[in-house]
Image: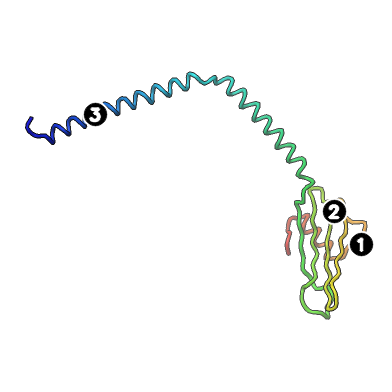
Amino acid sequence: MENPILVIIIVFGSWLIFLSLGFFWLTRHTKKRIIESVPWEEFAKDTDKKFGDLQKQLKKQSDSSIFFIQKIGFLRFNPFEETGGDHSFSISLLDGRDNGFVLTSLHTRSSTRTYAKAIKNGTSPYGLSKEELKVIQNAKTDTGFK
C-alpha cells in the first residue's frame, strides 16, 4: 500500500462503521431495558389517580369561580343635554350569579358625583337609571363596553 490517503480512508471508514454499529446496539439494548424495567400497571394506576385528583380540583375551581367578577358593562353618556361631552359613566361588575354593583359618576360643570348601587340577581333595591339598567344588561349579555 503505497497510497497513504487510501489507507487513512480505509482506517477511518472502518472506525466509523464500528462506532455506528456500537451506537445502534447500545440504543436498542438501552430502550429494551428501560421498557422492561417500568412497572406499567402501577404507572397507569398512579396516572389515573392523579387525573382523578386533577378533575376534582378543576371542578372545585369551576364551582368557586362563579363568585368572581365575570361580567362587566361600561357606558359613557351625557346626562344633561345643555352641557357638552360624555364625561359621565356607569360601570357594572357582576359575578356568575349576576350579583355585584353598579358605579355611576355624573359630571357637571361644577362637580362630579359618584353613586354605587348593589345588584342582587341582576336587580337592585335602589332605583336604577336607564344607563345603569343598560350597563347591567350589557354585562349580562356579554356585550360589555359600549
**Which residue lies under the disc numbered 1?**
127
Q: Position of residue 106 (x, y in %)?
A: 84, 70
Amino acid at dot 1: Gly
Earlier in the chain: of badge 1 and badge 2, it is 2
Residue 122, label in figure: 2
Q: Position of residue 142 (x, y in %)?
A: 74, 55
Tell me the kind of residue under disc 2.
Gly
Q: Give the label, 3 or 2, closer to the camera.
A: 3
Q: Position of residue 21 (x, y in %)?
A: 30, 25
| Picture quadrant where residue 102 is located | bottom right
Q: Earlier in the sequence, mark 1 or mark 3?
A: 3
Residue 143 located left or right of residue 4: right
Which residue has dot 3 on it? Answer: 15
Decide which of 114, 140 is in the foreground and name it: 114
Measured in 3D between alpha carbons, the distance from the residue under mark 1 to the one under mark 3, in whole angstroms, is 91 Å
User: Is residue 9 positioned above or below 108 on the image?
Assistant: above
Q: In 3D space, how far apart are the residues under numbered discs 3 and 2 (Cα atoms)?
A: 80 Å
Instruction: Specify the quadrant that holds the N terminus.
Output: top left
Check the image and report above or below for 52 versus 98.
above
For the point 34% across and 26% down, which residue is it?
24
Mark 2 burial class by Cα count in 10 Å: few <14, some 14-19, many 20+: some
Q: Secondary structure at mark 2?
A: loop
